[in-house]
Image (cartoon, rainbow, N blue to C red):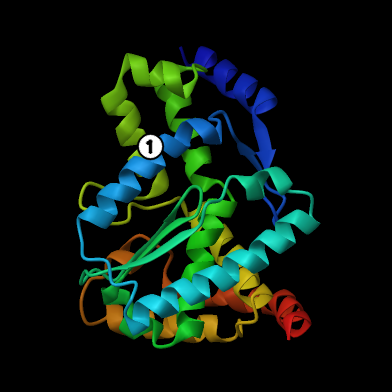
Amino acid sequence: MKNFILFLALSAFTFACAKVPLTGRSQLAMVPNEEIQPLVNEEYQKAKSSAKILTSTKDGQSVVRVGTKMAKAVEAYLIQEGYQDLVKEFAWEFNLLESDQVNAWCMPGGKVAFYTGIMPICKDETGIAVVMGHEIAHAVASHARERMSNGLLLNFGISALSTAMGQNPTLTQQIFLQSVGVGSQLGMLSFSRKHELEADEMGLIFMAMAGYDPREAPVFWERMAAKGGQAPLEFLSTHPGPDRRIERLNANMPKALEYYNSAK
């Protein structure tokens, strides 16, 4: 049985492999994005209907403004690098939802939600850009598709998502929710450490491309760590430790500053 699973995994990796923009890492991509999108739309609508939308407020407008600016910069970079097909998959939407949760997330296709609980830690639009860059990076890197591909491979072999939905729609829905990082209470479930650190690296570059000072990213995570010392935070419990995160951000800072200086 183990040999058979290994065979499936190797076969899937050979025929369904993609590369992550910016980092160039190879990833499993068995699930077509057009099959994921109906699930995304359904869950995003659920998220919006479960909380008051505050997009018209000052903070809400800041979230939309930062998100729109970053999406434009990221799309320009992707087109320049030959990822036109990936750009076509995004239908960006940015919303601020009323909730005490210290959290934010981005679903495949660019469906973004910030919770009001994270706004005091963001402090300003540069802080919003730190979080926005990280969450957008998960979508650009197709981390959800990669996780879902792995989950479906283990549970259904190499069947398509549509076949999996017919065999066991409940399990497929559960795999999807885990893949995009949204649980039954709309809180984040953990991406792998590899995905989180990759999103940090890409997010740092993305905020710099959009003209936000990347040197503020470590400062933001220091604020987040200080807040986390007062009470458990969903955002910290599902992400790498702040010391490790800040160390990696500083290591990638010279590259980010090149993009930032070019964007001025």
| Residue 244 shown left or right of residue 81 in the figure | left
The percent position of residue 153, horizontal first and vertical second, equals: 48, 24
The percent position of residue 37, horizontal first and vertical second, equals: 46, 38
Q: In which quadrant of the rendered view does residue 250 lie?
A: bottom right
Q: In which quadrant of the rendered view does residue 64 lie?
A: bottom left
Quadrant containing the C terminus in the rendered view: bottom right
| Residue 123 shown left or right of residue 138 in the figure | left
- Residue placed furthest toward the front: 56
At x 59% / y 53%, what residue is drawn?
A: 140
At x 65% / y 81%, what residue is drawn?
A: 211
At x 34% / y 72%, what residue is drawn?
A: 55
The percent position of residue 142, horizontal first and vertical second, equals: 55, 46
Residue 133 versus residue 156 in the image, above or below: below
| Residue 116 shown left or right of residue 165 in the figure | left
Of residues 74 and 226, the one nearer the viewer is 74
Instruction: Please give the residue where the numbered disc 1 appears in the rendered image.
Output: 39
Question: Exactly how many numbered labels are in the figure?
Answer: 1
Of residues 157 and 65, the one nearer the viewer is 65
Inspect this view and state whether residue 186 appears. no
| Residue 184 shown left or right of residue 148 in the figure | left
The percent position of residue 178, horizontal first and vertical second, equals: 35, 42
At x 69% / y 25%, what residue is drawn?
A: 14
**Kind of residue at badge 1:** Leu
Residue 121 versus residue 22 in the image, above or below: below
Mark 1, other Cα within 10 Å: few <14 / some 14–19 / many ≥20 = some
Residue 12 versus residue 247 in the image, above or below: above
Q: Secondary structure at mark 1?
A: helix
Q: In which quadrant of the rendered view does residue 42 lie?
A: top left
Inspect this view and state whether residue 167 appears. yes
